[in-house]
Amino acid sequence: MDTAHEIREFLATRRAKITPREAGLPAFGSGNHRVPGLRREEVALLAGVSVDYYVRLERGQLAGASEEVLDAVCRALRLDEAERAHLHDLAAAQRRRPPRRAARKPKAPVPASLTRVLDAMTDTPAFVRNGRLDILAVNPLGRALYSPLFGGSTRPVNIARFQFLDPTSRDFFPDWNTSVDTTVALLRTEAGRAPGDPELTGLVGELATRSEEFRAAWAKHNVRLHHTGRKSFRHPAIGEITLDFDAMVLPAHPGLTLTVYSTEPGTPDDDALRLLASWAATHDDRARREDPARS
């Protein structure tokens, strides 16, 4: 990926989201404000840098910018935590050194100790993924929850590829539009951390070629951190279920994230999770009878 191009597009799209009124400025140029959002001159004013200098930054020349200047631009554009990290990551990538909070590609498979932790989580779905959203390890209840993703022959299972290229994803994710916006934002965030990852570049290229929806979402240049929240599914065996999730970056295993789902005890979603566990046990028993090699 062209880092300078990514910088240009990211800053331009962030600038377009803020009006002078929101930034606390009078309408620059009276009623002749010809661009959406802020002008470059206005961002420069808010950041305390010259117009020429900010123009160079927005043209993709971040390599020489200090941390203080980058932080000033972040404040001027009212970037959130994920956007701030992304801008710093892009600058670091252009300087050709590891970016802050770098998510480097693991050199080895998921450690056996981590898979044992997953398997010990018997009452909650859990899985380990990388920044490209490949599911690298999953416990039995997690596999049951994501069973539609494991029906194909492609390995490793990739959440983004399923969402955009498998038509059944629109039924599996009831709020498909919001779900895919999150997915693309996570891939954008990873692209800032690891711009030279050939597998990520290949995945983005594949999705951009085959999915118009992906191209439209990718062009927004949105990024986000995805640590906790709620997610809904329409499971083919148990129907709709909404789960709380916590996604934990694993410092001992750079590039890996552990995602764990849970429910509030005594709620309908908790009952649905118990039903999923029962279905998973029955489904697994049937698979073992049909394929003794799995035992």
Image: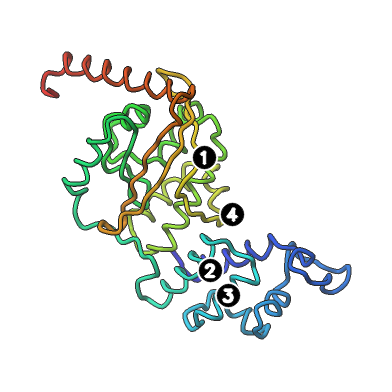
Q: Which residue is more in the foreground, 12 or 238?
A: 238
Mark 4 sits on what residue?
220
Q: Where is residue 76 in the image (x, y as percent from the top left)?
A: 65, 72
Q: Judging from the image, what secondary structure is the residue with disc 1 in?
A: helix
- N-terminal of the pair, mark 4 or mark 1, is 1
Residue at 14% from the left image edge and 24% from the top image edge: 294
Q: Which amino acid does label 4 sit on?
A: Lys
Label pair 3/1, CB-CB below 8 angstroms: no
Residue at 33% from the left image edge and 46% from the top image edge: 258
**Pair 4/1: label in front:** 1
- N-terminal of the pair, mark 3 or mark 2, is 2
Q: Judging from the image, what secondary structure is the residue with disc 4 in?
A: loop
Q: Which residue is more in the foreground, 38 or 118?
A: 118
Disc 1: CA contacts within 10 A as few (<14), some (14-19) or many (>=20): some
Q: Where is residue 200 in the image (x, y as percent from the top left)?
A: 37, 54
Mark 2 sits on what residue?
7
Q: Judging from the image, what secondary structure is the residue with disc 2 in?
A: helix
Mark 3 sits on what residue?
59
Label pair 4/1, CB-CB below 8 angstroms: no
Q: Judging from the image, what secondary structure is the residue with disc 3 in?
A: loop
Q: Distance between the residues labelled 3 and 2?
A: 7 Å
Q: How far apart are marks 1 and 2 (CA)?
A: 25 Å
Q: Distance between the residues labelled 2 and 4?
A: 13 Å
- N-terminal of the pair, mark 3 or mark 1, is 3
Disc 2: CA contacts within 10 A as few (<14), some (14-19) or many (>=20): many
Q: What residue type is labelled 2?
A: Ile
Horizontal arrangement in the rendering, residue 26 relative to residue 234 (left or right):
right
